[in-house]
């Protein structure tokens, strides 16, 4: 979601200097629809590469799901890197003439406090997401969706099994750190940038990207809370203009769940009961923090896209 040069306004953040400009001077592919087509093709290629990569894992056979915690962890790691990291990297390299990673979002945040706020934002949103999870569970879903959800929950529970330090370290790497980096690069760095330009509205692009982010995870009974999670990450990225704050928030949020699930495995399948009062308090705090970020940021649609 960054740019390069039309005017030579040199900015310095934390000792790092770079030029800010309009998109056109640094874009190989100016059209957002062409960028979207490139990203979709990249995801398709990544899906094939991920499938081939998993088959290279010892003990994994075509037509069979990986079994055993070690095999599942390796498959999960390869899938995350190939399915999200590859499209993000290819999009950046083919879309921008220079400073591809910076344009994708790997640059300093506008303000130091923006590194902390997304973490707090996700933590205070937990009651709201829990309440939405309760609502989501009550929605009528086809039987095959329930079966797919149960199968995935069982695999996640097996993946998170083990309380030894080495088990927790590997789980944090596979389920928190790596997904935090590659998913944010793909969804916020690439897709959200495209969607905001297509809709000509930051919030429309953020919301649509959040919904796609949730759908990609294939957790139908958790679609609503994960959509809210994606929207909050998208808003934090938009205001901070950096992937690092949302990568940290994503990794911390997932990491807390990984550690908690090691001692309370039922968390994987059970949704907590959250009174609507706490959900409303959570919502108010979330809105307040987003309003604070909006007040402190200098980002505008015109500055980035025009």
Image (cartoon, rainbow, N blue to C red):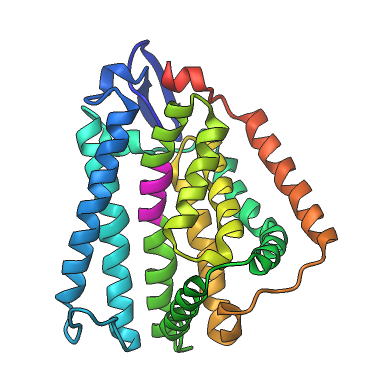
Decide which of 174, 212 is in the foreground and name it. 212
Q: Residue at x 46, y 52 (%)?
A: 213
Residue furthest to the top in view is 7
The front one of 89 and 42 is 42
Q: Position of residue 48 (x, y in %)?
A: 19, 60
Q: Is residue 101 visible?
A: yes
* Magenta span includes 184: yes
Locate residue 117, reporting x and y percent.
62, 47
In the displayed structure image, the side of residue 32 where residue 223 appears, left or right:
right
Residue displayed at 38% across by 70% down? 173
Query: In the image, is 113 to the left or to the right of 69?
Result: right
Residue 47 magenta-highlighted? no
| Observer-nearest of 241 and 235 | 235
Q: What number of labels is visible?
A: 0
| Quarter-of-image position of residue 288 | top right
Q: Is residue 29 left or right of residue 269?
A: left
Counting from the top left corner in percent of width and height, residue 15 is at 41, 33
The range drawn in magenta is 181-189
Above or below, comparing residue 292 to residue 150 in the picture: above
Q: Position of residue 287 (x, y in %)?
A: 72, 42
């Amino acid at each position: 979601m960054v740019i390069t040069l039309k005017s030579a306004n040199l900015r310095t953040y934390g000792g790092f200097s770079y030029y800010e400009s309009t998109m056109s001077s640094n874009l190989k592919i100016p059209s957002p629809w062409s960028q979207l087509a490139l990203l979709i093709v990249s995801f398709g290629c990544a899906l094939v590469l991920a499938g081939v990569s998993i088959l290279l894992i010892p003990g994994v056979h075509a037509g069979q799901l990986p079994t055993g915690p070690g095999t599942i962890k390796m498959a999960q790691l390869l899938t995350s890197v190939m399915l999200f990291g590859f499209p993000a990297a290819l999009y950046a390299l083919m879309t921008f003439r220079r400073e591809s990673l910076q344009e994708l979002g790997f640059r300093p945040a506008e303000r130091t406090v923006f590194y902390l706020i997304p973490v707090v934002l996700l933590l205070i949103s937990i009651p709201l997401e829990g309440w939405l999870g309760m609502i989501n569970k009550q929605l009528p879903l086809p039987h095959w969706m329930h079966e797919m959800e149960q199968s995935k929950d069982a695999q996640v529970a097996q993946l998170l099994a083990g309380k030894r330090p080495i088990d927790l370290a590997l789980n944090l790497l596979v389920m928190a750190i790596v997904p935090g980096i590659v998913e944010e690069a793909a969804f916020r760095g690439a897709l959200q940038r495209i969607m905001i330009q297509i809709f000509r509205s930051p919030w429309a692009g953020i919301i649509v990207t959040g919904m796609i982010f949730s759908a990609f995870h294939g957790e139908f009974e958790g679609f609503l809370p994960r959509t809210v999670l994606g929207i909050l990450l998208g808003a934090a990225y938009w205001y901070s203009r950096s992937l690092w704050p949302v990568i940290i928030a994503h990794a911390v949020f997932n990491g807390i769940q990984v550690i908690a699930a090691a001692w309370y495995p039922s968390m994987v399948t059970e949704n907590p009961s959250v009174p609507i009062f706490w959900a409303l308090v959570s919502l108010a705090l979330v809105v307040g923090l987003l309003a604070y970020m909006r007040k402190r940021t200098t980002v505008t649609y015109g500055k980035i896209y025009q």
